[in-house]
Amino acid sequence: MSEINLSNIKHIVLILSGKGGVGKSSVTTQLALGLVQKGFKVGVLDIDLTGPSIPRMLGLDGKQVHQASQGWVPVYADEQQRLSCMSIGFLLSSKNDSVVWRGPKKNAMIKQFLQDVYWGELDYLLIDTPPGTSDEHISIVEYLKSFEPDGAVIVTTPQNVAIADVRKEISFCRKVKLPILGVVENMSGFVCPHCAVSDFCSFWFKV
């Protein structure tokens, strides 16, 4: 196997959440699209192996990964090839197939994504992770250590249970010395169906 080589990627950002269902993949997708609109070239790596959502979020269901001499070619979401994506969802025969793997096999798959995907030159690589602080998180942080990722964006929702879990995610980042770029409080917006008064969700970042 080849060595991990991400030298052509300028910025690496992990998207984390302490709890499932807080909209982490939605935030990853919105960040990617926002960066592309600003003229950056962006890649999205989906390492949520048991619940890959990014292909559907980007409208790429049913697409396939192709093999080239440099490695796996990611799936492009636009004609200009400014937004690329890699996910285990592209490798399954059906989007309804389940991935029933133990930790070592998951870790090997993540490493293979990092080794074998030919991203080319990217301004940003966004890594969509599963919820919690499991094997996948420890593995991706260890594999990326020598590349000094920019940090993590942590996604939560206003509920007390989600906030309690996101504190654990913050603790994880501190323990592995992964900088926290900011926290997104998702799903805190509401539009009244009667008077149309809006209460928008809050985004707060540490600069």
Image: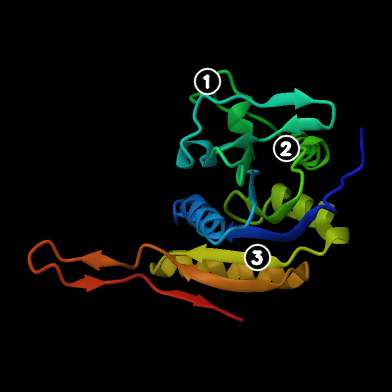
Residue drawn 72% across the image and 73% down it: 174
Image coordinates of residue 122 in percent, x first then y, are: 72, 52
CA distance for labels 3 and 2: 21 Å
Q: Is residue 77 above or below residue 30?
A: above
Residue 106: assigned label: 2
Disc with the residue nearer the chain's start (3 vs 2): 2
CA distance for labels 1 and 3: 31 Å
User: Within 10 angstroms of label 2, few (less than 14), some, or many (20 or more) residues?
Assistant: many
Q: Quadrant of the N terminus?
A: top right
CA distance for labels 1 and 2: 19 Å
Give the structural element (helix, strand or loop) at label 1. loop
Judging by the rendered image, the residue that carries numbered circle 1 is: 94
Judging by the rendered image, the residue that carries numbered circle 3 is: 152
Give the structural element (helix, strand or loop) at label 3. strand
User: On the rendered structure, is 28 left or right of 188?
Assistant: right
Image coordinates of residue 207 in percent, x first then y, are: 61, 81
Residue drawn 71% across the image and 47% down it: 136
Amino acid on which disc 1 is placed: Ser
Does the rendering let one see residue 42?
A: yes
- Of 199 and 142, the residue lying toward us: 199
Image coordinates of residue 192 in percent, x first then y, are: 15, 66
- Of 64 and 191, the residue lying toward us: 64
Q: Are marks 1 and 2 in contact (CB under 8 Å)?
A: no
The residue positioned farthest toward the bottom in the image shown:
207
Amino acid on which disc 3 is placed: Ala
Question: Mark 3 or mark 2, which is nearer to you?
Answer: 3
